[in-house]
Amino acid sequence: MPDERLDAEELARLRELGQRFMRGVPHNKALGLELRAMSDARAELLLPYDPRLVGNPETGVLHGGAISALIDACCGAAVFQALQKPMAIATLDLRIDYLKPAAPGRAVIARAHCYKVTRHVAFVRGVAFLDSEDDPIATSAGTFMLGTRTTSRTEGAA
Amino acid sequence: MSPTDAWLQQVVAEARAAGDPGRLAAVIPYAQTMGISLRLAPDGPHAGELQGVMRFGEQLIGNPMLPALHGGALCALLESTAIFQLLWESAPPATPRTISLTVEYLRSGRPVDTFARGVPTRQGRRVTNVRVEAWQDDRARPIAVASAHLLVHSDEGPVKFEL
């Protein structure tokens, strides 16, 4: 059955991408990010609650920086999904609006959609939430440069 | 929105009395995890100014091919530095809470220590705007800049709407 084969292929691809995403990117691994879903130009990531990522030790609320990193990673994953072929990307700019604090003890989910890809630049929207995308913790808009260099230079210009 | 957390006020007061902003960063678990600390610039034209420092560690890498720092890690340094700047120097009426953060990535972050400096550009009664720059070896070549809007108003007490 061709459909079943495609589904199995798709699942294997997602699993492989997810593993590469975790193993290949030390900061994603340090945050414990989990790739939950990927489809055309979209990605969904989960940031598990972790006391090491708390910004206010009295309330136990996660630091905004951890949410930013989650959103940045999710937007990058969405860009990879939108590209015809794999290439290096780099965040050009990212704006994040913090609508309300994350709840202590709760994992945060991020979804991103790369809604436009041009020759040099990809445009991405993102949202972070606990239960529902309709009740967000944070929203974002960002742009990524495509086809950035993949080897290091002695002088650090991107 | 509550007034500045009492415990945080106390930490700031103690850190200021000791002339050691590092004590402030030391109580924030996320700052510890990220290797973010605070220092007063030791010498040169910027001696004495508050600076955020993110010590390089493998866990900060976002692109292992280059290698380059994760954009989220730089976000963390920039945002933390903006908040610490307000706590340290301007004693805001409430614990600053980030409303929005816009980060522009100018150069890839190499696997070395990164420094940041926040400058409040407009301090309103309710909202403060802080510009933050992050650099590595050469301060004249920032690797990222950010603009942050922070809510510094306490809901306790009347709000007068004015521009």
Image (cartoon, rainbow, N blue to C red):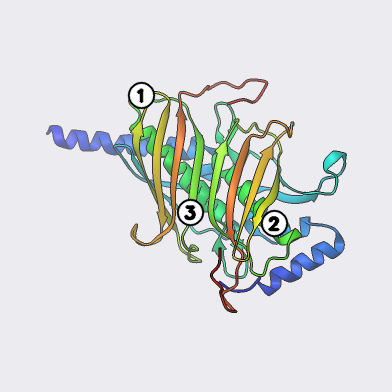
The answer to whether A120 is drawn above or below residue B82 in the figure is: above
Q: Quadrant of the C terminus of chain A?
A: top right
Residues A104 and B119: in front is B119
Q: Which mark is residue A97?
A: 3
| Element type at mark 3 | strand
* Callout 2 and callout 3 share a chain: no
Residue visible at 60% across and 30% down in the picture: B107
Q: Position of residue A95 (x, y in %)?
A: 49, 46
Residue topped by disc 1: A85
Q: Chain of mark 3?
A: A
Q: CA distance from mark 2 to mark 1?
A: 42 Å
* Residue B12 shown left or right of residue A64 in the figure: right
Residues A101 and A31: in front is A101
Number of numbered callouts drawn: 3
Q: Which mark is residue B84?
A: 2
Residues B73 and B12: in front is B12
Q: Which image quadrant is residue B112 in?
A: top right
Residue visible at 60% across and 79% down in the picture: B157
The answer to whether A37 is drawn above or below residue B90 in the figure is: above
- Estimate how packed mark 1 is, as few (under 14), some (14 to 19) or many (20 or more) residues with alpha carbons within 10 Å: few
Q: Position of residue A64 (x, y in %)?
A: 55, 55
- The three-letter amino acid code for the residue at tag 1 is Lys
* Residue B25 shown left or right of residue B18 in the figure: left
Residue visible at 55% across and 71% down in the picture: B1
Q: Position of residue B26 (x, y in %)?
A: 72, 58
Q: Quadrant of the N terminus of chain A?
A: top left
- The three-letter amino acid code for the residue at tag 3 is Asp
- The three-letter amino acid code for the residue at tag 2 is Phe
